[in-house]
Image (tube, rainbow, N blue to C red):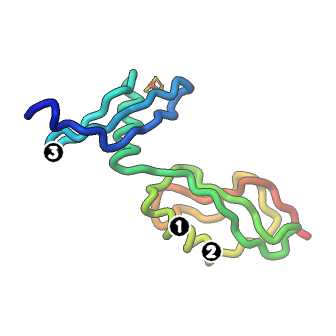
Amino acid sequence: MSESSASVVKVIRCIVCPTGCQIQAIQKGSDIVFEGYTCKRGLEYAQQEYFEPKRILTTTIRVKNGFLPLIPVRTDKPILKEKLSDALNEIAKIQVNAPIKMGEILIESILGLESNVIASRDLTEK
Ligand code: SF4
């Protein structure tokens, strides 16, 4: 295989530490290799981001009898990007009761994943 068959298919900014290395995912034949990282954590981040990107999901849930009608929520662990839409649909079906404490689990193991949906603030009753 010649060097000229390699091409950059994605550029990933590592966010694991403030250095912010720019990592390149390079197609070499049938393989993807990574360049530009300066530590193992960066390589692991780039591999995760390239092959199975995950995100923390943030949204709101409807609240019955709350001081506000909606409460901001987020997942306590990142979930696969491809599952975000299904998770949002699941969350849209839910209504919770006030009072709610920040960090309280409002949906356990959403979609059967390891992530819980938790409250991002306190919310008192009206
Ligand atoms: S590759 Fe390592 S040094 Fe570079 S930003 Fe990522 S964690 Fe930091």
Left or right side of 57 for 29: left
Q: Amino acid at mark 1?
A: Ala
Figure quadrant of the N terminus: top left
Closer to viewer: mark 3 or mark 2: 3
Residue 54 lies, with reference to residue 98, above or below; the image says above
Q: Are marks 3 and 1 in contact (CB under 8 Å)?
A: no
Residue 15 lies, with reference to residue 121, above or below; the image says above
Classify 10 Å Cα crowding around label 3: few (below 14), some (14-19), many (20 and above).
few
SS category of the residue bearing label 2: helix
Label annotation for residue 71? none
Tag 3 residue: 30
How far apart marks 3 and 2 lie (CA) works out to 41 Å
Residue positioned 30% across, 39% down in the render = 8
Residue 16 lies, with reference to residue 91, above or below; the image says above
Q: Extreme front residue here?
A: 4
How far apart marks 3 and 1 lie (CA) works out to 33 Å
Q: Amino acid at mark 2?
A: Ala
Classify 10 Å Cα crowding around label 2: few (below 14), some (14-19), many (20 and above).
few
Residue 49 locus on image (x, y percent): 40, 44
- Sequence-wise first label, 3 or 1: 3
Seen from the viewer's position, the closer of residues 69 and 34 is 34
Q: Amino acid at mark 3?
A: Ser
Tag 1 residue: 87
Residue positioned 42% across, 38% down in the render = 12
Left or right side of 19 for 59: right
Seen from the viewer's position, the closer of residues 30 and 92 is 30
Q: Are marks 3 and 2 in contact (CB under 8 Å)?
A: no
Residue 63 locus on image (x, y percent): 77, 72
Tag 2 residue: 92
